[in-house]
Image: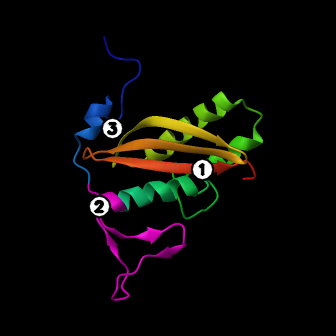
Amino acid sequence: MPSLFPTIGVPATPSARLNRKVKFGRSWIFDFDEGEFRLTAARRIEEADETQAYYEWCQKALLTMRYRYVIYSPDYGSELHKLFRMALSRAAIESEIARMVTETLMVDPRTGQVGGFSFMWLDDGVAFDCYVLTAKGSQLELSGRMDMAM
C-alpha cells in the first residue's frame, strides 16, 4: 500500500542523510567576538578548511534573524530572538531552543544530525551546547547564548 506521507527529495533516516555526497566549499575564518576576519602574519585573510567553514555557517545562521533581511531566503536564520517574549516555562524554552536550533541547521545539506543539547540558566538568560554531525560524519560542538533582553 502506498504511503500517505511520501518523502520528496529528503533522505528518510538520519543515517541516509549522513551518507550523501555533499560539497562543503571553502571560506575565510571570521572572529565573531571581534567582528573581523582573522588575519595571518602576512596580513592576509586566513582561509578556513571545509569543517571550519561549515561551523562558521552554523554560527552565522543562528545569529541571523529569520525573515529580517531580504537578501536571505525565508529558510535561513533563526527565530530564537522571539522566545523570551513568550511566557513559557524553563522546560518549554529549552524544548523550543532545541527545536529552533535543529530547524535552523537542518536546512543546510551539510548537516547530518543535531542533538545532545545541554542548558545552563544564567541571571540574564540561558546558554546552550549541542553537537552537530556533518554529512561527512565529523562532529562539531556548537555553543550559543540567549539573553532575556533580546
Magenta segment range? 23-52
Q: How is the image coloured?
A: rainbow
* x and y, in percent, of residue 73 in the image: 52, 56
- Camera-nearest label, 3 or 2: 2
**Residue 115 marker:** none
Q: Quadrant of the N terminus?
A: top left
Question: Mark 3 = which residue?
Answer: 9
Tell me, for residue 50, which label it has, or none.
2
Say left or right for 143 vs 89: left
Callout 3 secondary element: loop
Q: CA distance from mark 1 to mark 3?
A: 33 Å
Q: Residue furthest bottom?
A: 42
Q: Which mark is residue 145?
A: 1
Q: Earlier in the sequence, mark 1 or mark 2?
A: 2
Disc nearer the start of the sequence (1/3):
3
Could you tell me which residue is drawn at 36 percent across and 29 percent down?
7
Give the x, y percent position of residue 27.
Answer: 35, 69
For residue 147, above or below residue 38: above
Q: Label 1 amino acid? A: Arg
Q: Could you tell me how far apart the alpha carbons at marks 3 and 2 are, in whole angstroms?
A: 24 Å
The answer to whether 113 is drawn above or below residue 74 in the figure is: above
Question: In which image quadrant can residue 48 be found?
Answer: bottom left
Name the chief secondary structure element in magenta: loop
Whether residue 131 is situated above or below residue 35 in the rendered picture = above
Whether residue 149 sits left or right of residue 19 in the image: it is: right
- Tell which of 135 and 44 is nearer to you: 44
Q: Is residue 109 visible?
A: no
Residue 37, placed above or below residue 25: below
